[in-house]
Image (tube, rainbow, N blue to C red):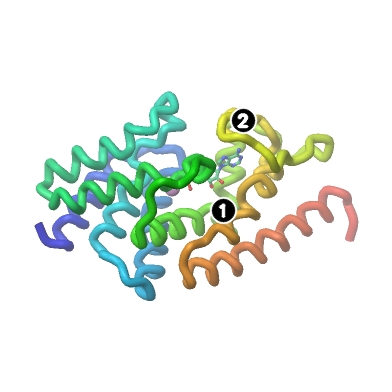
Amino acid sequence: MNHDLLVTSTVKFVQEKLAGAESGHDWWHISRVWNNAKLIAQTEDVNLTIVELAALLHDIADSKFNNGDEEIGPQTASNFLNEIGADDQITEQVALIIRHMSFKASFDKQQYFSKELAVVQDADRLDAIGAIGIARAFTYGGYKGREMYNPNIQPDLNMTKKAYKNSTAPTINHFYEKLLLLKDKMNTTTGKQLAQKRHDFMELYLQEFYNEWEGTL
Ligand code: ADP
Ligand code: NI
């Protein structure tokens, strides 16, 4: 099946499947990651079909909302791609990317890597930082009923995978535990450039946040 047809069918599938999803992982997150991925791919030597399909399907079934089942995402993506007649080689690579892309997976010794994974992972990480990243963090924190900030609760920089998942810490701590670390984890040149800009904006935001918190001018 050709590239355009694969992409169009996948867009339709993802839009239907994510209708009503929580706003940090809704169709608009996918749409932003897809755009980021296409932008980054322009300066990388990658298979664009694999990049676009993986970007579109990367959050198709998030383990956070499926009792921690890490296999449901790659499985849902493979089933769908098989059904629409994608080449086996494409389906396999897309499933591998989805399986190895999560921040949680980055705590594990990374067993799989590809240029396409590098692009999609950067595209997803970009959506977790900058102005959008800030909005998503507070949305997610609110959804989990967390405080936005508590000066008595320090960030935990040595969090294990399990502790991270069950963390009840205020949302500001998430900046130090994850968001401010992402710029140094970027894989691609374009990804690094875009991440630096978004990182600087978050630093500025935090300064302003503390100023307002303290009531200083
Ligand atoms: P992604 O879908 O980008 O792989 P996650 O599923 O880990 O990322 O998180 C989705 C969004 O929720 C991200 O913007 C992330 O920063 C935010 N988020 C995840 N965990 C927390 C947390 N403990 N506190 C605040 N925001 C969080
Ligand atoms: Ni995502």
Could you tell me if the residues under marks 1 and 2 are in contact, i.e. CB atoms within 8 Å?
no
According to the picture, the residue beneath numbered tag 1 turns out to be 133
Left of 183 or right of it: where is 68? left
According to the picture, the residue beneath numbered tag 2 turns out to be 163
Secondary structure found at label 1: helix
Which residue is found at the position 53% from the left and 52% from the top?
Answer: 128
Indicate if the residue with disc 2 has its beta carbon within 8 Å of ligand 1. no
Which of discs 1 and 2 lies nearer the camera? The answer is 2
Question: How far apart are the alpha carbons under marks 1 and 2?
Answer: 21 Å
Which residue is found at the position 27% from the left and 54% from the top?
Answer: 53
Which residue is found at the position 40% from the left and 68% from the top?
Answer: 40
Q: Quadrant of the N terminus?
A: bottom left
Q: Residue 144, how many percent across, how many down?
A: 58, 31
Q: Residue 143, how many percent across, how many down?
A: 56, 33
Q: Amino acid at mark 2?
A: Ala
Indicate if the residue with disc 1 has its beta carbon within 8 Å of ligand 1. yes
Q: Which mark is residue 53?
A: none
Of residue 27 and residue 162, the one placed in the foreground of this image is: 162
Q: Residue 140, how many percent across, how many down?
A: 56, 39
Q: Quadrant of residue 35?
A: bottom left
N-terminal label among 1 and 2: 1
Q: Quadrant of residue 22?
A: top left
Of residue 30 and residue 154, the one placed in the foreground of this image is: 154
Which residue is found at the position 47% from the left and 42% from the top?
Answer: 105
Q: Quadrant of the C terminus?
A: bottom right
Left of 138 or right of it: where is 127? left
Secondary structure found at label 2: helix
Q: Amino acid at mark 1?
A: Gly
